[in-house]
């Protein structure tokens, strides 16, 4: 199950990183892309961040490492924050590695990723 979860995270990340960059600065709902950075160093890892005018922020970094049994794994740390229709800010900071997916969640503006910040977020 753990290997499946890690493969799922890696597949989703690959899809995001492989997506073409946005050519327009605003979508049909008037949401602007304020910041977008993506670096893919193949076996050396990756990092991406995007930030939008609707206060949605998502950042993730993947770094290869050796597990305790000597197996190569990709350790991922990330964070995302969004404002829901109820006006509340929700955030998730997470780590995924050979020990599984370990999220930390909360609400409010303290604890999650902040504008201009990149993963990893530690609090």
Image (tube, rainbow, N blue to C red):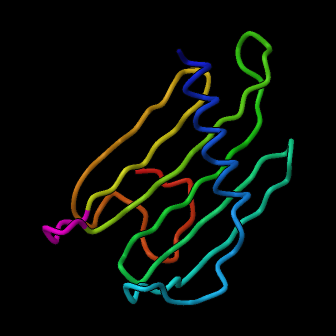
Q: Quadrant of residue 111?
A: bottom left
Q: Quadrant of residue 85?
A: bottom left
Q: Nearer the viewer, residue 56 or 123?
A: 56
Q: Nearer the viewer, residue 62 or 13?
A: 13
Query: Measured along the vertical axis of the image, is residue 57 above or below residue 121?
Result: below
Judge from the rendering whether residue 76 lies leftward or rightward of residue 113; answer left or right: right
The answer to whether 106 is drawn above or below residue 89 in the figure is above
Pick the front one: 87 or 78:
87
Residue 50: x and y in percent read 55, 70
Going 56% across and 90% down the picture, which residue do you hit? 25
Q: Position of residue 63 (x, y in %)?
A: 73, 42
Residue found at x 72% / y 69%: 20
- Segment tinted magenta in the rendering: 84-89
Q: Position of residue 104 (x, y in %)?
A: 35, 41
The residue at 39%/89% (across/down) is 30
Closer to us: 119 or 17: 17
> Could you tell me residue 114's position as x and y percent?
42, 70
Q: Is residue 15 above or below residue 87?
A: above
The residue located at (69%, 63%) in the rendering is: 19
Count how many numbered circles sit on residues in the image.
0
Q: Is residue 22 left or right of residue 85?
A: right
């Amino acid at each position: 199950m753990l290997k499946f979860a890690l493969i799922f995270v890696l597949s989703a990340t690959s899809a995001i990183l492989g997506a073409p960059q946005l050519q327009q600065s605003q979508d049909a709902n008037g949401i602007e892309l304020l910041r977008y950075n993506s670096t893919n160093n193949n076996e050396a890892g990756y990092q991406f961040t995007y930030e939008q005018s609707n206060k949605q922020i998502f950042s993730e970094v993947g770094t290869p490492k050796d597990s305790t049994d000597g197996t190569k794994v990709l350790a991922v740390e990330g964070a995302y924050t969004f404002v829901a229709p109820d006006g509340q800010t929700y955030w998730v900071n997470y780590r995924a590695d050979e020990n599984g997916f370990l999220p930390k969640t909360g609400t409010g503006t303290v604890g999650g990723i902040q504008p201009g910040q990149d993963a990893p977020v530690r609090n």
